[in-house]
Amino acid sequence: MNPGAPLAGLRVIESSLLGPAAITTHLADLGADVIKVESPSGDYVREMTWPIVEGVSLLHLHINRGKKSIVLDLKQAAGVETYLDLVRGADVVAEAMRPGSLERRGLGYGRLREVNPRIVFCNISGYGATGPYKDMPSHGIAFDTWAGLVKPAYDEEGFCFIDEHASMGMHAGPLFGALGILAAVIRARATGEGSELEIGQSDAAAYMDWYRSESWKAYERPESEVTGNKSDDYERRAPGTAGMKEGVRYQMYESSDGHVLFMASERAFWKNFCDGVGRPEWFEKWPGSKFADHARGNRELQRELREIFKARSSADWIAFSTEHNTPIAPVNTPQTIAHDPQFQHRLPWYPADRHGADMLPFPVKYLEETLPEPSKAPTVGEHSEDVLASVLGYSSERIAKLRDEGVLG
């Protein structure tokens, strides 16, 4: 029996521009009622980035799926009053734009809690609401360059360019923000008291890379206190994946039709591999440490491994991994991952005929339940009259008056 969507009954009022609107996408995917309040000109996210799918950006189709759109001209008093009416029955207001944007319209947290003491108000912005960078304009890649996640690259003519990378801040910021919102809602429902919180997408990018930054910070302490691990004779290696270049038993290898990632850094896994490929003499010659041994710099062994991995396909090595209990992983690309059988099993696409583009679902599984499929991302003001009637109970006459006055765009 499906008990209903996990966040059914949670109402969120969203004021947003561009990518930060993803902070409520996670909530909408879990069944929250998310009402996106747009200006008469609408959120220009519909025209940003690429690809453009039948005239609408994939960015909009993904991050605004499952939401309702209502247009309110907040430059008019009637628009502000209607916004406050929405807040009266809501749990959350998400301000996904520069801090203070709603405050300038008379809709700051202080005013909102006057009409709803339980309201949770969350701002998500580029660099957060405080600090020397708080007023700087920014886009998603800025959070990753600020956090040290993207190195400058150079083309054949010596021009610097942004290298391909997985954008971190624009995805992690909304995810952490959604987590903070839900924690605040739980407390508000228990105490009757709302709260105000904020998150910078740059902060989230830095936090997602905590292992490297905390490692460098640890290395500021004397070597008598902070060392490398036992298998490396306690040598301090560069943090994170930067310390993997010289790895041999933990390294990428070319297969007959692609690449795989070999991860036999534990002695037991290494022995399983050697026995599985019929080369027990490798283990006898290079048994290594019990844990965390990458056989760094062992070119003799690396040459042997290079040849043996080339002899089989990636699929063969993945099957070998399970059969012989040896960690070997596929090496996919964003283009090829959709063909991976694990991907196909775990992440069935939301189809383009219902959503405008093929999109990945929310990745958390509720056992013996099926999450509701979100609706297609809305056009500007698509649900204005429906929200005013069904959520606020406005009469058709009142709605018509707002329409005539231009409050609804």
Image: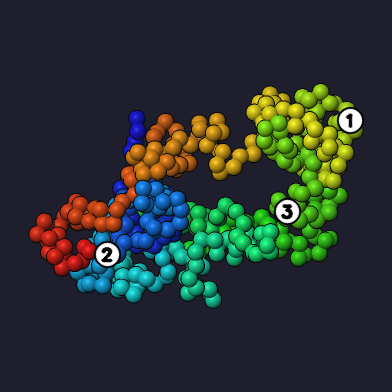
What residue appears at the point 50 percent right and 31 percent down from the top-left corner? 345
Q: Looking at the picture, which amino acid does disc 2 mark?
A: Pro
Residue type highlighted by circle 3: Ala
Quickly name the residue at label 1.
284
Secondary structure at numbered mark 1:
helix
Q: Which residue is mark 3?
A: 242
Q: Nearer the viewer, mark 3 or mark 2?
A: 2
Residue 327 visible within the image: no
Tell me the mark number nearer the camera, choosing from 1 and 2.
2
Name the N-terminal-most of marks 1 and 2: 2
Residue at 68%, 64% in the rendered image? 158
Mark 2: few/some/many CA within 10 Å (<14, 14-19, 20+): some
On the image, numbered disc 2 is attached to which residue?
A: 40
What distance separates the C-alpha of mark 3 from that of mark 2?
49 Å
Q: Position of residue 249 (x, y in %)?
A: 78, 39
Instruction: Please indicate whether residue 111 sits to the left or right of residue 266 in the image.
Output: left
Image spot of residue 320 (x, y percent):
69, 26
Instruction: State how far apart marks 3 and 1 are (Cα).
Output: 29 Å
**Residue 87: image location, x then y, percent:** 28, 61
**Inter-mark Cα distance, 1 to 2:** 73 Å
